Image: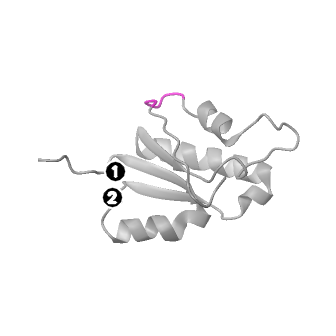
Amino acid sequence: MAKELSFKDYAIVSCGTLAPELNYLRKQGFLDAKKIVYTKPGRHEIPKELESQLIEKINAAKELSKRIMIVYGGKFCYVNADNPYRTMDTMIQEQEEGLRQQRKRYRAFDCR
């Protein structure tokens, strides 16, 4: 018998732009996450605000679970003009202290 897929032990941090998709998956019974927290949609236009909100939401998720899934767009979701080498992945890696590392990156069709 195949093992049933479950996210019940996960807290999910996501861009608010993806809320309709994640809420649909939740409503369909596929996404049974403990909690989903969102940053404001459109924060890619204000990188410093995106960074502070992402860190804030990751810290909130750490209070809920040791297993955190972060759902964001691709490399153009966060562009720091002051430090072009600072990426979304860099910010996430800096927040991983104390978390079980199980990093996977999946490419979305509409995000680069």
**Residue of label 1:** 7
The residue positioned farthest toward the front in the image shown: 109
Colour scheme of the rendered structure: one colour
The residue positioned farthest toward the left in the image shown: 1
Decide: marks 1, 2 in contact (CB < 8 A)? yes
Q: Which residue is painted at 61% across and 65% down in the image?
A: 17
Q: Which residue is painted at 61% across and 61% down in the image?
A: 110
Is 78 situated left or right of 104 in this image? right
Structural distance between the alpha carbons of marks 1 and 2: 5 Å
Q: State yes or no: residue 74 in magenta.
A: no
Q: Which residue is painted at 36% across and 54% down in the image?
A: 34
Residue kind at label 1, given as amino acid type: Phe
Report x, y in % for residue 21: 49, 67
Which quadrant of the structure image shows residue 18?
bottom right
Q: Secondary structure at mark 1?
A: loop
Which quadrant of the structure image shows residue 100?
top left
Residue kind at label 2, given as amino acid type: Asp
Magenta: predominant secondary structure element? loop
Report x, y in % for residue 75: 69, 46
Q: Which residues are magenta?
A: 97-101
